[in-house]
Image (cartoon, rainbow, N blue to C red):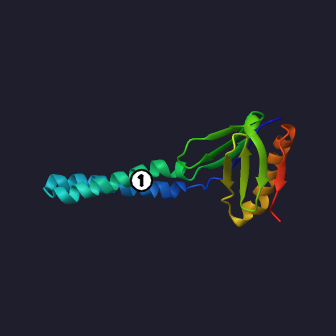
Amino acid sequence: MDSRTFDLSVPVSRLLLAGWSAFGAIQVAGGAFSIERGDDILGVVQVAFGLFFLLFVVLMPRVNRYVIAFDDSGLAFEKALSRTRKIPWASVSEIEIQRMKLKIALKEGKNVKWNFNMSHTDNQIVKPRIIAALNEFAQANGIPVRDSRS
């Protein structure tokens, strides 16, 4: 069976990122100019503010990352800045599909929850595809799936 990946990340406009980058660079340059003029406190504040915006531009695409993937070995969840969580099919005892989240019961007795953070359109179009792929892979691996959405 082939793998299926659903990227539900919210894209960040390149124009917005460019604007934030320019603003951060202007703040850093203005801060350097203020320090050179002898206004150290304002300069340090401007440099810190500018570096914050430049760091924000680097981290923003990663903060919006929200991916679920299925393959023959298991399923993987990737959220924001956290590490990808991979769950092998062999460790899953049951999957419950709820209205706004998946609840995955592991054989060790723990549960993993994954929220469907989607827009209305994605909820109507993408969510059924995710559930169909999940059912297909779970059935192939002999994992019971309960649907509690009603």
The image quadrant where one finds the C terminus is: bottom right
Vertical position of residue 138 compared to residue 30: above or below: above
In-image side of 66 versus 122 (left or right)? left
For label 1, the SS is helix
- Looking at this rendering, what residue extends furthest in the left direction? 38
Which residue is nearer to you in this view: 120 or 21? Answer: 120
**Residue at the front extreme of this rendering:** 109
Q: Please give the residue where the numbered disc 1 appears in the rendered image.
A: 21
Give residue 78's quadrant in the image.
Answer: top right
Query: Is residue 18 or residue 121 the one in the foreground?
Result: 121
Residue 100, image x and y in percent? Answer: 72, 61
Q: Which amino acid does label 1 sit on?
A: Ser
Please tell me how crowded label 1 is: few (under 14), some (14-19), or many (20+) other residues with Cα within 10 Å. Answer: many
Left or right of residue 14: residue 45: left
Residue 25 visible in the shown view: no
In the figure, 117 relative to 81: above or below?
A: below
Q: How many labels does the image show?
A: 1
Which residue is nearer to you in this view: 7 or 83?
83
At a point 66% along the width and 38% down the height, the residue shown is 86
Q: Which residue is drawn at 57% across and 53% down?
A: 64
Q: Where is residue 46 in the image (x, y as percent from the top left)?
A: 27, 57
- Name the spot of residue 119 as percent of width and height, x first: 68, 64
> Image quarter for residue 127?
bottom right
Q: In which quarter of the image is the N terminus?
A: top right
Give left or right: position of 147 versus 100.
right
* 125 left or right, relative to 45: right
Q: Where is residue 61 in the image (x, y as percent from the top left)?
A: 53, 50
